[in-house]
Image: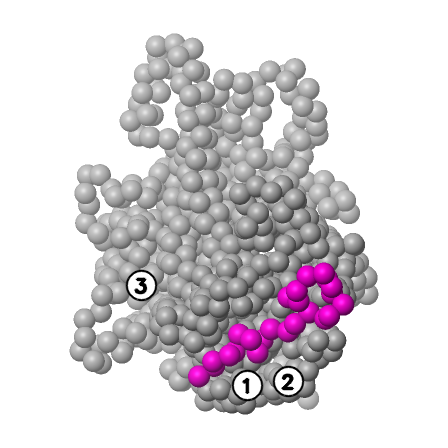
Amino acid sequence: MRRRAEQKEDSAEPIAMEKDYGSITTNAPVQRPDRNVFSDGTSRVDFVLVWEEPLSSQEEERKGLGLTHKKWRMAFLNKLRDSGLLQETKEVLEVKTKICFVLLSAPWNVLCYYAEEITLRVPLQVVTAPSTNWSARVLSRLSLPNPMSQDVPNPPLDFHTCQFRNNKLQRFLGSDNKEKFFKTTQRHQVLYEILARTPYGSVTRGEVGIDRLLSEQVFTAGYPLHEGGFNMPTPPVPLKSWDLREILYFYWATWSSWRHYQPLDHIREYFGEKIALYFAWLGFYTGWLLPASLVGTVVFLFGFWLMATDVPAKELCDSGNSFPMCSLCHICSDWNYSSICLTYKAGILFDNGGTVFFSVFMSLWAVTFLEYWKRTCLFLSHRWDCSEFQDIEERPRPEFTAMAPMTMKSPVTGAEEPYFPEKQRLNRTMTGCMVIILMVVVVLVFLMAIILYRSILTVFIYKSGGFLTGWAGRVASISSSVLNLIVILLLSRVYMSLAHILTRWEMHRTQSKYEDMFILKVFIFQFINFYSTPIYIAFFKGRFIGYPGNYQTLFGFRNEECGPGGCLIELAQELLVIMVGKQLINNTQEFFGPKLTVWWQKRKLGHQLREVKEEGGEEERREDKQEEEQGDSPWEADYQLLVYEGLFSEYLEMVIQFGFITIFVAACPLAPLFALINNWVEIRLDAQKFVTEYRRPVAERAQDIGIWFPILQFISHIAVLTNAFLIAFTSSFLPRLYYGYTRDETLTGYINFTLATSPGNYRQTQPPCRYRSFRNADGDYLPEYFHLLAIQMAFVIVFEHVVFSIGLLIDLVVPDVPEEVELKMKREHYMAKQALAENQSLGISLFPGEKEVPSKVL
């Protein structure tokens, strides 16, 4: 690893500050004894590495790789010791294995070196301006009580910060207290940086870093420690003395906190900016779902009134045997149109004039939501000192640093950085694109298989002649929806693993770029995976069926027609099965899965440890009794928790949900309501997982939610087009308007208008039947078909132009940067400019992260 040159003394000041810097620990609450320490009682445990060894040497030899793993492990630990980390080993015996814990601690000099190396930000001055929620400000101005507010103890302080510089240490706030100067999350970041870039073997073979060692099972776990337990302290102590984890559990993760604001500053202080931004976005999105769900529910209830007063529905239900319909498959029998009375009325709940208004509303809602989230994200990133993280401060990934074949001078910082040739990355990216295309083809093949399954099952039920014969189409439709959901979930798991391998192989420089490319791959696949069936039902099913006597076929089966109630109610059913079914499955897994896993791990370890203790002597049992009175050590307790697997699945679940409530909202006005209920549960489940069930993740910095925001923008644009086509070509809104304008305003006779009569040469021995189309007796299209087609195309053009124009106007009216943030940024830039001007007058050029270079005298 290339080391930087020795630091030189710099007489320049980073920012002009007041003389009284104060102390971070002013008025700090009395802290309870900290158990996250070495045996000496002073060295803090910053990270824990764990591995398990069989007690039997024969067992170890049978497992293989035991000697190789030992060699790698010892080499890695020796390298860590050479880098300056303090180590202490703890052992726990089980029945057949020995669990070894290596406690790591970074001394002050190591923290200072790497803090400057990875550009950590440290405090200069306390910012006293409080941060308030916009709804809290509105309610305060109206002098109304705020049921969502709560007084969370020990709110983290906000600071003006700058990048840490070791030779300017005395100018930073709290530098007199070396134990508390670096936040716990910053110590974790330093430790992870060292662990991720330390080699244990050949660098050319990629034998570098803790992540590779974990994947090779050399270590079974590596994690920072939680700060104490999460239950309320016993005996009771003042709120100011509560640990941060206890505060988060009681004021955030409990179900009673569902109606309160999330303590985002506390979340950021404990888990880092990346996780805090996820919960900020999730809470913001859930709050915006409230007006959408209210409007959608009103539109749905409006459908009940229409269902009772709709003239075509009454006409159909009273038609008796007036409309004998042609069979829906080649072995099916004819049926009467009046037999679908209830289904037709149920379709009105989803297919009425209110859905047109709701489609426009949701399109504008999506645009406005994204604009205001952009403002909120900028406010939070600036408040949390991450507004320039990706542009300037983000360093190369440790794995990239270790495996890059060459170095190159950075055009931003001017420093030598690891480099991977763009041509090689482009070739690897193109290979990844081919794999994505192949997987998309696999999804389409499964879609064709489900279509054939639906046709075959319908025919089979009709042939069986059982009690389900009259419900053959509905049974086939529902069962295919459930089967489609299962296929979706299975393919998702396969492709996730494949996308991880491809993205790692592409060698992206920064963690943000790595995650963005991984997310993009998976989203493209999941977009096709989740939305292919609804798109098929909405825009293709029943479009290419022909007419009686000239039906079109696929693999020998007649092309699918829409069910008796029409395609829109089938689409609503498909959406509810996929969306609600997926939410129920995910929430059930998130609620019971982690709890059962943690319970089983604790039970297994506890049972094995008890057996070992019973084999020991009396003196050993007395020592164990004393340990039990204190409880498990923090590293043992955290080892029994689950591994944090990142935020990808959490974001993906919400983004797919966002697509369902915007792209197909015309078919299901209740989708936002189901999403709102799900998200209220989701926030608490995720909070409980992070606080009580996951090992503590290494804090990561982030400027925004990454590529998820462009994906949400893409979905909002696609939603405008899909809703326009859905209303124009799938719903009965425009045919009803056309009939009311050209024939009868009361819609009397509308049912007969939408039905064509089979040609005379079709089933000459039987009376003619009716089918839904605008054709004459010879099977040719009527003029009304072309009139309606022109109206439908015009509607699509007008709809999307109006919505996009209003969305553009909203984008122009709503500024991206809030006024208070803009003023604060200008103030900070002005202070930095003043400091730079002062430094230049001394003949010094100062840039964050650069070494000081005296200016030349010409």
Magenta residues, dominant SS class = loop
Mark 2, Cα crowd under 10 Å, few <14 / some 14-19 / many 20+, is some
Residue positioned 47% across, 44% down in the render: 589
Q: Mark 3 highlights which residue?
A: 261
Residue 612 vs 210, above or below: the answer is above
Mark 3 is on which residue type? Answer: Tyr
Query: CA separation, marks 3 and 2?
Result: 56 Å
Residue 180 screen position, x and y as percent: 37, 54
Q: Position of residue 609 (x, y in %)?
A: 43, 21
Seen at 25% across and 43% down, the residue is 232
Q: Amino acid at mark 1?
A: Tyr
Q: Find disc 1 in the rendering and name its residue.
A: 738
Q: Secondary structure at mark 2?
A: helix
Residue 251: horizontal and vertical position, in percent?
Answer: 28, 54
Report which quarter residue 730 is drawn in. bottom right
On the picture, is 676 further left or further right than 142?
Answer: right
Task: Please give the residue where the numbered disc 2 appears in the rendered image.
Answer: 784
Tell me the magenta residue range: 746-769
Residue at image position (42%, 40%) is 592
Task: Give yes or no for contact between labels 1 and 2 (Cβ–Cβ under 8 Å).
Answer: yes
Residue placed most toward the observer, 63 or 372 = 372
